[in-house]
Each structure stands twice: as structure tokens, then as C-alpha cells.
Image (cartoon, rainbow, N blue to C red):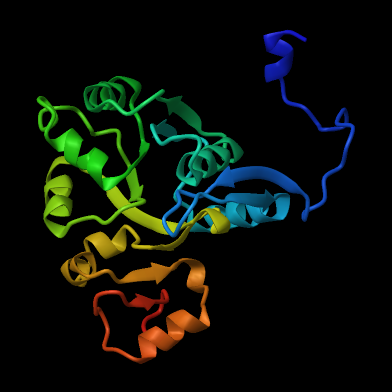
Amino acid sequence: ESLEDFRRPQDGSHLPVQAARADTCLQIYTSGTTGQPKGVLTSHGNLLADLLRCELTGLRSDRDKLLLCMPMCHIGGTGITIRSIYFGMHIELMREFNAAEVIRLVSQKRITKAVFVPSMLHMLLDTPGCREADFSSLDLILYGAGAMPYELMLRVLEVFPCRFTSAFGMTETNGGVTNLSPVDHVGPRAEELLKSDEVRAMLRRRAEAVAARARSSAPANTGEYVNSIGVE
């Protein structure tokens, strides 16, 4: 089979096995935050549910160009790659993060979406030529996998003329479970939200532990979780 044959759209009729939603399609390891890294078995149903969630957010389209420098051994890299392929996005995949190369690629390739951890954004800001670079093509930056200091977020907002969204979750949940939306970064509660550890549950999903924590304290306390329509 040639490369051109491989690249042509396929209808799936040639596949020897039909997978069920509960069948495992991916094993990826946790980062070991609470102990030794654990192998998480992700089913086809898990991935399909995650794709539906992303589809409902409306933050991606087949016109987008994604810059990806997250590791493929982490759900942050693998999950975003699968979602981007599903939406037909162009992916500019970097072997490893390099701040100067990121700046060049965003400008030359007209990147519209990018994914970073806060430390990457910090390194970008400290790279010569960052403030003078052309980031006009950027529409959205997704960040996560670590705390975003408020002072760093203010610096980032000054340099990158685009929307921002955060995502935090676990390997067991295919990545993002909670987030701050683009509106949360510029709305009337932006400073309050960004200074606190408050995040919003994606698509109004709820958990009893989250609800109990929210009911036991005033809004915007450090460590508090709320759903997308406010504290319960």
C-alpha cells in the first residue's frame, strides 16, 4: 500500500474486527501524582464521549491549525491529538518544546490554536523577540497541567491577542474535567477567578464531593469547585 493509498478516505469496511464501545482502544499512563504511574485503560466509548464534549464547546473546526508540543505519553498530548484529527484540523507537531521555534511557527504557519503548560508560556515571554512577533493568527490558547499564577496570566494577556481557556482533569477522565472559559478570563469576575483556584465543571457535570465542598464555603475560596451556573 502506497502513502497515497493510506491517505485516501476509508469507509472502514476492510477492518477485520468491529469494536464495541466498552472495548479498550488506548492504554496511557498517569503522571504519578499520587504514587507510581498507573496504566489507564481507555475505551472507545470514553473517547467518543470526550469528542462529543469537545464538539459541544464549539472551540474547534476543520479550518484550524493546531500547534502541539505536549508529550504523546501524556493524556494532554494524546487526547488533544485524537480530538484534532476527529475535527479534521491541521496539526503542526513539534518533537519537543522550543520557545524560539514556537514563536517562528506561529507566525510563519499562521497557527490558530495552541496548547501549553504555564511554564511554557513563561519561557515564551522570556524569549527575545516574543513581544515583537506576529501572533495575529492565534484564536485560542489552551493551558493546563499546572497552576497559572495570576501575575503570569496578566503578562500573557498583554502579549497574546487571543482567547484563553484552561483545562484540568485526569488520565482516567481523558483529560479535562474542569475549566475556565474564554469569558472567565475577561469578564467581570476575571480577576477573582484567576486569582483563586476556582474552576468550573465542563458542561455542568456534577459530583457529590464537589457539591458538598461548594455548599460548605463561600464562593471563590481557594480550593473551591463550582459548576457552570454557580455554586450550589
Query: In this view, which residue lies farthest toward the top?
Result: 2
For the point 37% across and 85% down, which residue is it? Answer: 214
Name the one closer to the observer, 23 or 160.
Answer: 23
Residue 232 can be seen, yes or no: no
- Viewer-nearest residue: 91 or 138: 91
| Picture quarter with the C terminus | bottom left
Camera-side residue: 101 or 139?
101
The residue drawn where x is 12% and y is 46% is 158
Tell me residue 59's x, y (percent): 44, 50
Point out residue 196 in the picture as x, y percentages from the top left corner. 22, 70
Question: Is 193 above or below relative to 20?
Answer: below
Q: Residue furthest front?
A: 36
Q: Is residue 52 left or right of residue 160?
A: right
- Seen in the image, is 56 located left or right of residue 196? right
- Relative horizontal placement of residue 3, taking residue 98 as reference (left or right): right
Q: Quadrant of residue 119?
A: top left
Residue 177 lies, in percent from the top left, at 47, 62
The answer to which quarter of the image holds residue 14 is top right
Q: Residue at x 15, y 59 (%)?
A: 150
Count of marks overlaid on the render: 0
Quarter of the figure with the N terminus: top right
Q: Is residue 215 visible?
A: yes
Residue for point 44% across, 35% down: 71
Q: Is residue 126 left or right of residue 25?
A: left
Q: Is residue 195 above or below residue 39?
A: below
